Image (cartoon, rainbow, N blue to C red):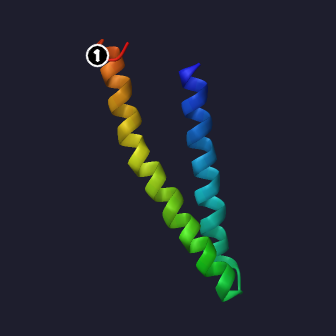
Amino acid sequence: MWTWLLASYACLLLLLATFAGLIAVFVPNAHHRADAYRVLKLALGVATGTGGLITAAIKMYEHGILR
């Protein structure tokens, strides 16, 4: 169950960052590029910030701290 949930979350963030990056680079409209760049920064910040938290929670669960 946890594996599917974490894998789905990671795929969603990867797709969001990919499409926001493509729009930020290739769209000629400056307003759309600025919005896409903000979404890209947010997606990458969430991905890197929660990645460590999820890893720590998994390790604590494996060692029996979280039950």
Q: Residue at x 36, y 28 (%)?
A: 57
Q: Seen in the image, is 1 located left or right of residue 27? A: left
Quadrant where the N terminus sits is top right
Pointer 1 residue: 65
Q: Residue at x 32, y 23 (%)?
A: 59
Q: Quadrant of residue 3?
A: top right
Which structural element holds mark 1?
A: loop
Q: Is residue 20 above or below residue 7?
A: below
Quadrant where the C terminus sits is top left
Q: Residue at x 38, y 25 (%)?
A: 58
Q: Quadrant of residue 32?
A: bottom right
Q: Is residue 29 above or below residue 13?
A: below
Q: Is residue 42 above or below residue 36?
A: above
Picture coordinates of residue 51, whole percent (x, y): 41, 42
Picture coordinates of residue 19, whole percent (x, y): 66, 62
Picture coordinates of residue 48, whole percent (x, y): 41, 50
**Residue kind at label 1, given as amino acid type:** Ile
Q: Quadrant of residue 60?
A: top left
